[in-house]
Amino acid sequence: NTAPYTTDLSKCAPKPELVTACNLKTKKIEYNVDKSKIDNVNYTLDLDKCKETPKPEEIQVCRLDDKKVVVISKDEYNAHKDKYSTVLNDCASKPEMCPIPGKEMLPKDSADCKQASTVPAELPETGLGDSLAQLLGAGSMVGMASAFVASRRAMKQN
């Protein structure tokens, strides 16, 4: 039966040596870094490497106010997200749409977007003159019919 602990320190893992190092990915000095992590890829003992200011990451964006694609720093984009879009298609020119109801999905310059002009073949006949002529014509027909009937009655009486 052995205990999980021992008083013989030679059987223990050595205590890691902790150093101050430059994290090459973040460009920040870190304290108490295990010396075994120093590989000049992730960490280095050269603290001057952390004094270099990293070049800001640049991205291509669409500037929304003038619809132009520009390259700016990521910090500038994060500070003014309302002025830029990472969707470059937002800068593509959008055609003006047809204003005619029922044809709103067509481009304005489309041949199908033309307003059909409906010119009647003949203007409608309206007004007092036509009504009077019709009334006069109907009155003449009634007068002729009355005269015809009267002449027939007169012939029967003779």
Image: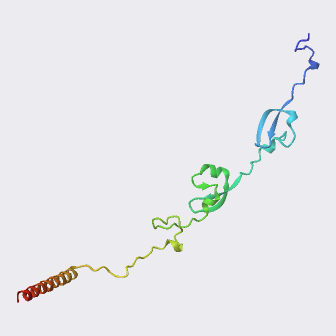
The answer to whether 77 is drawn above or below residue 3 in the figure is below
Quadrant of residue 4 within the rendered picture: top right
Quadrant location of the N terminus? Answer: top right
Q: Nearer the viewer, residue 135 or 67?
A: 135
Give percent across and percent down for residue 72: 66, 56
Q: Nearer the viewer, residue 11 or 96?
A: 96
Residue farthest along the right direction in this orientation: 10
The answer to whether 51 is drawn above or below residue 93 in the figure is above
Q: Residue at x 7, y 87 (%)?
A: 154
The answer to whether 11 is drawn above or below residue 87 in the figure is above
How many callouts does the rendering have?
Answer: 0
Q: Nearer the viewer, residue 48 or 71?
A: 71
Left or right: where 34 falls relative to 112: right
Q: Residue at x 52, y 72 (%)?
A: 112
The answer to whether 94 is drawn above or below residue 141 in the figure is above
Quadrant location of the C terminus? Answer: bottom left
Q: Nearer the viewer, residue 120 or 149?
A: 149
Left or right: where 36 falls relative to 66: right
Left or right: where 153 falls relative to 138: left
Give percent across and percent down for residue 19: 83, 32
Give percent across and percent down for residue 86: 64, 54
Left or right: where 1 falls relative to 29: right
Residue farthest along the left direction in this orientation: 158
Give percent across and percent down for residue 68: 62, 63
Q: Residue at x 10, y 88 (%)?
A: 151
